[in-house]
Image (spheres, helix red, strand yellow):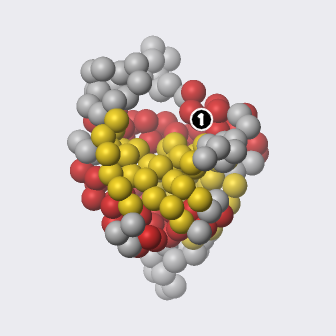
Amino acid sequence: MSDLRVRPATPADRPVVERLWAMFQHDLSAYRGELPRADGTFRDERLVSAFTEPGWRPYLFTSGTEAGAGAVGAGEHAGRPAGFAFVRGLTGPARILNSFFVVRGARRTGLGARALREIVAAHPGTWEIAFQDANAPAARFWPRAVGAIVGDAWTKEYREVPGRPEIAPDSWITFRAG
């Protein structure tokens, strides 16, 4: 996954991001105990907002290579979707990484940390990132990825999830970059 590309998602990218969204929501359902709606889809308010609301920006991550030169199938994954991120609060005092997803086949390759660095660099200022501690991979990833950007100049606090008393409070990491 050496050929990462992180770019703002366009309306033409929306069908790809919608499919990635379904994978993201499926992963999160393990921590939230949520099932899809009757039609088999998950809630998508944040997805819709990312493409339509002022102050939001959707990003798409693609990878141009898979296992490396000479590998069976090398090159056939050029430009394949590897993840997405939604940033909101671009017109406010803090940028909020609203959603962040890396497909399982690209995890633990450094792709997520590289994508985060590029997105943060594109929007200097105060950042907030929420995650559930029950999501152990996320609980390990976020302090490490943010630490690679700002060292130990970040804080963590717990905040209740608005309107969701059945869900444990979110962990929120706050930092300033750029």
Per the image, label 1 sits on a secondary structure element best described as helix
Q: Residue at x 45, y 18 (%)?
A: 37
* Amino acid type for the residue under numbered disc 1: Leu
Residue 62, percent from left and from top? 59, 62
Looking at the image, residue 50 sits to the left or right of residue 168; the answer is: right
How many numbered dots are placed on residues in this image?
A: 1
Q: Residue at x 35, y 56 (%)?
A: 155
Query: In this view of the protein, which residue sits in the foreground, 99 or 163?
Result: 163
Residue 40, percent from left and from top? 46, 22
Whether residue 72 is situated above or below residue 140 in the rendered picture: below
Residue placed under numbered mark 1 in the picture: 47
Whether residue 29 is situated above or below residue 11 in the rendered picture: above
Residues packed near mark 1 inside 10 Å, few (<14), some (14 to 19) or many (20 plus): some
Whether residue 62 is situated above or below residue 57 in the rendered picture: below
Query: In this view of the protein, which residue sits in the foreground, 158 or 53?
Result: 158
Looking at the image, residue 157 sits to the left or right of residue 105; the answer is: left
Q: Is residue 77 visible?
A: no
- Residue furthest top in the image: 38
Residue 143, percent from left and from top? 33, 61
Residue 159, percent from left and from top? 34, 35
Query: In this view of the protein, which residue sits in the foreground, 112 or 121?
Result: 121
Q: Residue at x 27, y 21 (%)?
A: 166
State the quadrant of the C terminus: bottom right
Q: Is residue 10 visible?
A: yes
Query: In this view of the protein, which residue sits in the foreground, 40 or 169?
Result: 169
Looking at the image, residue 34 sits to the left or right of residue 118; the answer is: left
Q: Residue at x 57, y 27 (%)?
A: 45
- Residue furthest bottom in the image: 70
